[in-house]
């Protein structure tokens, strides 16, 4: 339980700031869907999908690689590993920036024809480079256990991004209406997506500059032998990461290619994106967990009771994940108003995407067995299987079912790799997960969700009250049966005073 406590503590520190960061980004849905056209929202979704995939190439799994190799070295040699990793990623970024900016006309005509302006793509290319390079200093902060600085810099980025977006999308239109001469030198009446991308560029540039202390104050060295070992270890992780990330964004990449109505393609993708982002609440939870979980796995692997800790974490993670699913779906009548009514046609994707994301998070949780055994090629195999399933379903069914095919593709693909990883993992590195308890909560969540759907209550507030009662049942069972109340300091004191 001590190891689990440590994970919870790190999750609160790292995860708290991450959740705030993601929450602010999530709230920007309200701004973007009301200031940009649906087509521009669709273009932004498509461009950022490419960002996610390219980031996997540029970081090359070095975050996991750093933790793996730095734990093999004595503490004094940590900067040797860090310096080698930093130089490797720096080289990847420089090559990427040169090739993409130099051959931009060819890249644009191949991927987007004339559908997305070149200025949008240039801004995204520069943003990717800064993001990829700054990922390594952030890994150093995690290694040095400096969560406060880590969190502040992450929050700085999203806060600046929000401020710049508000300036360009809200303040500037007001100025243009009353004193247009003040901003006539840079303002234009249409194509506002460029201001969103420029805001991102400014925020990322300032954040990268703030990471200078992590880039100075030590002797740079490049250990070729170590670099070869890191690249060998990370290469399967790149395939795994590429397939894994593609599993999450491939629908946004494939959709413009296979959707038959080219006049509405980015409008439809915009609707899907707006409703998809409602489900980002689950992603916020899983991302916060992942920041703390990976270092925890490698550190805990030396303990004799590590497998029990992994099993406990899995149980609590799924219990909370199901609670998030119920919370989003039961209050969707309120949450949906973060997007305008013209996006509501895409709301049926929300429950499918939520569960699909939970499947993927469980799959990540299960991945410890091949990471600890240095059999990372299994991750590449699983993710490739998921990728093939997802891209296949998207290509076959998007032309007929539009973005609903995207949602179901992720649900099925993530579910399959979750199950395959579990069964093979039990053979290679057996962990006795509490399947009985996990099944009980999955069944309870399913029953409560069905009750909420089946019981017809026309009045919205009565419906919300009824669904709050249903969530109370889930939480009540969780507290009564499994929540380690005695392990929570304040509640522990209350418990002791009562007894």
Image: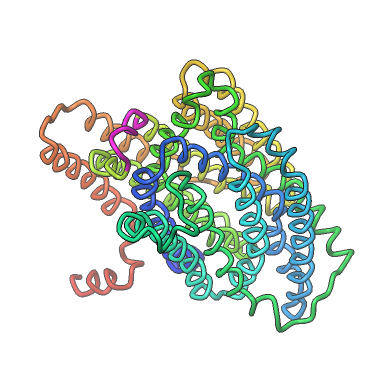
Image coordinates of residue 35 in percent, x first then y, are 37, 46
Query: What's drawn in magenta, residue-wise?
Result: 339-347
Image coordinates of residue 298 in percent, x first then y, are 64, 61
Residue at screen point 21% across, 41% down: 470
Q: For this rendering, which residue is in front, 286 or 74?
A: 286
Q: For this rendering, which residue is in front, 66 or 333?
A: 333
Q: Residue furthest top?
A: 400
Q: Is residue 299 above or below residue 403?
A: below
Residue at screen point 47% across, 25% down: 264
Q: For this rendering, which residue is in front, 257 or 241?
A: 257
Q: Residue furthest right?
A: 225
Question: Would you identify the image quadrant in which residue 62 lies?
Answer: bottom right
Is the C terminus in the top left, top right, bottom left or bottom right quadrant?
Answer: bottom left
Using the rendered image of the protein, determine whether residue 437 is visible from the camera's viewpoint.
no
Q: Is residue 398 left or right of residue 127?
A: left
Image coordinates of residue 390 in percent, x first then y, are 58, 28
Question: Would you identify the image quadrant in which residue 83 lies?
Answer: bottom right
Q: Is residue 226 left or right of residue 489?
A: right
The total number of labels drawn is 0
Q: For this rendering, which residue is in front, 363 or 280?
A: 280
Image coordinates of residue 422 in percent, x first then y, are 58, 38
Using the rendered image of the protein, determine whether residue 92 is visible from the camera's viewpoint.
yes
């Amino acid at each position: 339980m001590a190891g689990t406590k440590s994970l919870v503590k790190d999750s609160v520190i790292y995860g708290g700031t991450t959740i705030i960061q993601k929450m602010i980004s999530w709230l920007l849905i309200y701004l973007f869907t009301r200031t940009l056209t649906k087509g521009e929202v669709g273009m932004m979704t498509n461009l950022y999908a490419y960002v996610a995939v390219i980031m996997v190439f540029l970081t090359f799994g070095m975050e996991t690689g750093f933790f793996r190799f730095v734990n093999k070295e004595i503490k004094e040699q940590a900067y040797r590993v860090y310096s080698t990793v930093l130089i490797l990623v720096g080289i990847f970024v420089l090559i990427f920036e040169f090739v993409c900016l130099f051959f931009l006309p060819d890249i644009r005509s191949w991927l987007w024809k004339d559908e997305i302006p070149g200025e949008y793509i240039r801004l995204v290319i520069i943003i990717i480079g800064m993001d990829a390079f700054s990922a390594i200093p952030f890994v150093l902060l995690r290694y040095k256990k400096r969560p406060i600085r880590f969190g502040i810099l992450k929050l700085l980025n999203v806060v600046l991004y929000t401020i710049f977006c508000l300036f360009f999308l809200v303040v500037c239109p007001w100025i243009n209406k009353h004193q247009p001469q003040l901003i006539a030198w840079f303002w234009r009446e249409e194509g506002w997506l460029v201001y969103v991308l420029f805001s991102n560029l400014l925020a990322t540039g300032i954040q990268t500059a703030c990471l200078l202390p992590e880039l100075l104050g030590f002797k740079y060295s490049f250990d070729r032998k170590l670099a070869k070992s890191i690249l060998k270890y990370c290469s399967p992780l790149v395939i795994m990461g590429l397939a894994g990330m593609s599993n999450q964004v491939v629908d946004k990449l494939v959709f413009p290619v296979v959707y038959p109505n080219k006049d509405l393609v980015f409008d439809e993708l915009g609707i899907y994106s707006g409703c998809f982002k409602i489900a980002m609440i689950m992603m916020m939870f899983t991302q916060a967990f992942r920041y703390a979980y990976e270092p925890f796995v490698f550190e805990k692997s030396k303990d004799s009771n590590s497998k029990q800790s992994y099993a406990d974490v899995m149980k609590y993670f799924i219990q909370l994940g199901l609670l998030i699913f119920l919370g989003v779906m039961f209050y969707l009548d309120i949450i949906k108003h973060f997007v305008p009514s013209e996006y509501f046609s895409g709301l049926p994707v929300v429950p499918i995407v939520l569960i699909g994301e939970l499947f993927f998070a469980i799959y990540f949780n299960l991945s410890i067995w091949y990471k600890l055994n240095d059999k990372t090629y299994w991750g590449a195999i699983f993710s490739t299987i998921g990728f093939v399933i997802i891209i296949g379903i998207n290509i076959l069914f998007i032309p007929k079912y539009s973005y609903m095919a995207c949602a179901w593709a992720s649900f099925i693909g993530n579910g399959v790799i979750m199950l395959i990883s579990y069964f093979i993992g039990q053979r290679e590195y057996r962990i006795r997960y509490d399947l009985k308890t996990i099944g009980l909560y999955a069944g309870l969540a399913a029953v409560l969700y069905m009750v909420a759907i089946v019981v017809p209550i026309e009045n919205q507030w009565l419906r919300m009250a009824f669904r709050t009662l249903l969530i109370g049942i889930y939480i009540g069972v969780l507290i009564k049966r499994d929540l380690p109340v005695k392990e929570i300091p304040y509640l522990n004191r209350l418990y002791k005073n009562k007894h």
